[in-house]
Amino acid sequence: MKHLLSIEELDGDTLHHLVNDAVKLKAERGQHSSQPLADQTWAMMFSKSSTRTRVSFEVGVRELGGSVMFLSANDIQLGRGEPIKDTARVLGRMVHGCIIRTFAQQDVVDFAEHSHIPTINALTDEEHPCQILADLLTIHETIGGWDGKKIVFIGDGDNNMSRSWIWAAKYLGFELVVAAPEACLPPAEFMAKVDACNVTLTSDPISAIKGADVINTDVWLSMGQEGQAQKEALFADYQVNEQLLSHAAKDHIVLHCLPAYREKEISEAVLEAHSAVIFQQAENRLHAQKAVLAALAE
Ligand code: CP
Ligand code: NVA
């Protein structure tokens, strides 16, 4: 693996390996036998806010022996219009890898092409691959894996999280139902490109959640969509609350990548009732990303 730009460009074997490596790194935390990032400096170039991704990568790079610098896009010339390919050619001569959070997926692709250093997508408008790896690790730990399980993504069906989940379902073969208002389902061209018969789309949240083992939600308005009240109004029937969860499988888990907006995409009661798993999921960002960093340093 040279980069982690998306789930789309991975495959089932790589996903399994990364989750297995994350399990080992989690168990060995504090006593790693090797330091794969020794003598390396990694940059983190972020154009959007972050708590989990920023902290987990900063800690993860250090725990693997490297050092890390955080570059807010607003504080570097990128924010004043320097092209991504020039930024990439400069950073590529100085640091050993780069972790990028931005808007356009193409910027991450261009950075990887022009920098010639390992590049990680830490969230774009199109995908959030690091989060999906942490989610898979959490599913593995809590319900023993995804084989034969029904996983539901409810909320904005056409955002970075839903798209990454759809690609994960294609490669891992589990049943995935995406439940969203009609206008927020992924477009037919995207679904045709994925071409996965185990992924279904619906605008009926109750039928989606029937018998579900994993119920996954995310904000209704992603970063960059703030203030789109008309879009937000479409989701009134899509809140993950106790009533909706009464249709799920008995031992279901609820996942939320966080940050959560209580009484919008998830009720306070559900968030708190499932907080043990949801914050385990947040912690798993660290372990999953250390697996990615170690794989890229090889
Ligand atoms: N889930 C996630 O990516 O969180 P942050 O935006 O806080 O990094
Ligand atoms: N879909 C959300 C994920 C946040 C981690 C966003 O892009 O804002």
Image: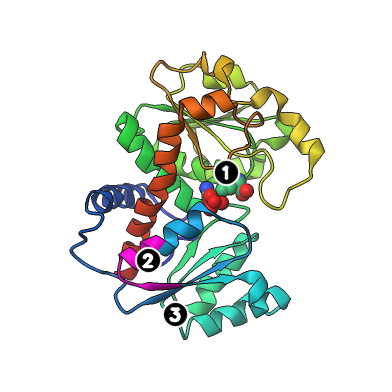
Residue shown at 53% from the left, 78% from the top: 114
Q: Secondary structure at mark 2?
A: helix
Residue shown at 61% from the left, 22% from the top: 205
| Residue that carries the numbered disc 1 in the rendered image | 259
Amino acid tagged 1: Pro
* Quadrant for the C terminus in the image: bottom left
Q: Is mark 3 within 8 Å of ligand 1?
A: no
* Quadrant for the N terminus in the image: bottom left
Q: Which mark is residue 83?
A: none
Q: Is mark 1 within 8 Å of ligand 1?
A: yes
Query: How far is the residue under mark 3 from the one under mark 2?
Result: 13 Å
Q: Is residue 237 left or right of residue 20?
A: right
Q: Secondary structure at mark 1?
A: loop
Q: Is residue 206 magenta?
A: no
Residue shown at 39% from the left, 56% from the top: 289
User: Dot 1, crowdedness within 10 Å: few (<14), some or many (≥20)?
Assistant: few
